[in-house]
Image: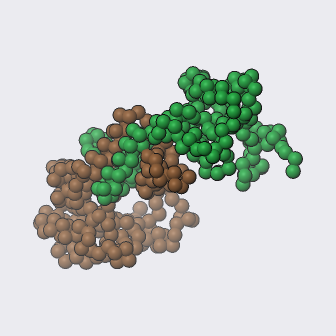
Chain colours: A green, B brown
Amino acid sequence: MKMQQKENAISKLIQQLEKLPGIGQKTAQRLAFHIINMKTEDVKALADAILSAKTSTKLCRVCCNFTEDEVCPICKDEKRDKSIICVVEEPQDVAALERVKEYKGLYHVLHGAISPLKGKYPEQLTIDVLMKRLSDPQIKEVIIATNPDVDGEATASYLARLIKPMGIRVTRIARGIPVGGDIEYADEVTILKAIEGRREI
Amino acid sequence: MKMQQKENAISKLIQQLEKLPGIGQKTAQRLAFHIINMKTEDVKALADAILSAKTSTKLCRVCCNFTEDEVCPICKDEKRDKSIICVVEEPQDVAALERVKEYKGLYHVLHGAISPLKGKYPEQLTIDVLMKRLSDPQIKEVIIATNPDVDGEATASYLARLIKPMGIRVTRIARGIPVGGDIEYADEVTILKAIEGRREI
């Protein structure tokens, strides 16, 4: 069976699908059989979408988010507040923040977080691009929205140390009990952060 | 955001991925961003695997399972027992049965089950192909391994009525408590089938 699996096109597809995150052997098999049962035009549309997402996506010259143009729609948008930049780890984070429809400033995508253990050093992130942006005198605040984990916190401290001397306000997103969450089940560090971050009501 | 989502290549990819079974919006997004971060050659390999699985897969002339040749490797295999045919609904079922490495006979893939409610009638399945196969006098038994649900049972009865008059033994796979399962949580019909199917120990 193992030998046979290497030979045919279905098994090759299953192998390719298994490489994707969160797709195990059973899911890969189910998807592969589904794809074979799809209409040929739909299969072509899927394959095309995969290729063109890869080939036509580049990094915005300004904020390093994924885009198809030189400058992304958010950076180009005249209505966005250009005095504030929210720094995130990944393009997905921009998508998540945009879904809230509340934040009207700009973004900067680092493409990772500093993590010496994982071999990620500051020079591998887009920190140099961010620093050049911050020379623009209209920028008043940088919100650091890296993840509240070890790497994200280290990156936040690192950036704060670099940016504060430039006379720009540096803020960090609040950490606390998630809405709908339960204090009883929250970990100690989260509870600590929730108390530290308490506000007048 | 909705408007913008329709325009770019990433959103198109997310839309395509969301059409796959078991892939919701969040998973589609995670997969899309993963694909963009993959090496170009790996993305090409994935897209090629999708297209070639679709284009190079056809139905085995004998058993109607997916194959790349005229006749599938199982039907071609001289070592398989040609006196017994196991009838299943889908190609996935053959893969599942082959994983057990116990059954050494042949298969027949119906490509569905009879279900008037879902608009699936006997003529849309590969029952005619099966009937032609059964005219071969070396076939002694047909094991019906359609799913133990309403459609699968209806299909099993239909096939049994057709095949029995030909003097071929027709058997049905056992229904009962799954191994590792719990009688306490089994439904009544399964318990009934388990009692009916009891054996001397």
Image side of residue B20 versus residue B162, left or right? right
Image quarter in which the C terminus of chain B is found = bottom left
Q: In which quarter of the image is residue B126?
A: bottom left
Report x, y in % for residue A98: 61, 48
Report x, y in % for residue B17: 43, 51
Which is more toward the observer, A172 or B149?
A: A172
Say above or below: A132 vs B110: above
Which is more toward the observer, A183 or A98?
A: A98
Report x, y in % for residue A195: 83, 42
Residue at x 48% of width, y 70% of height: B191
Residue B14 visible, this orientation: no
Residue at x 56% of width, y 41% of height: A76
Q: Quadrant of residue A81?
A: top right
Image side of residue B85 versus residue A150, left or right? left
Say above or below: A159 vs B118: above
In the rendered image, the residue lying farthest to the right is: A200
Residue at x 53% of width, y 55% of height: B2
Which is more toward the observer, B25 or A53?
A: A53
Report x, y in % for residue B109: 26, 62
Which is more toward the observer, A1 or A69?
A: A69
Image side of residue B58 versus residue A130, left or right? left
Residue A110 visible, this orientation: yes
Numbered disc total = 0
Image side of residue A88 versus residue A189, left or right? left
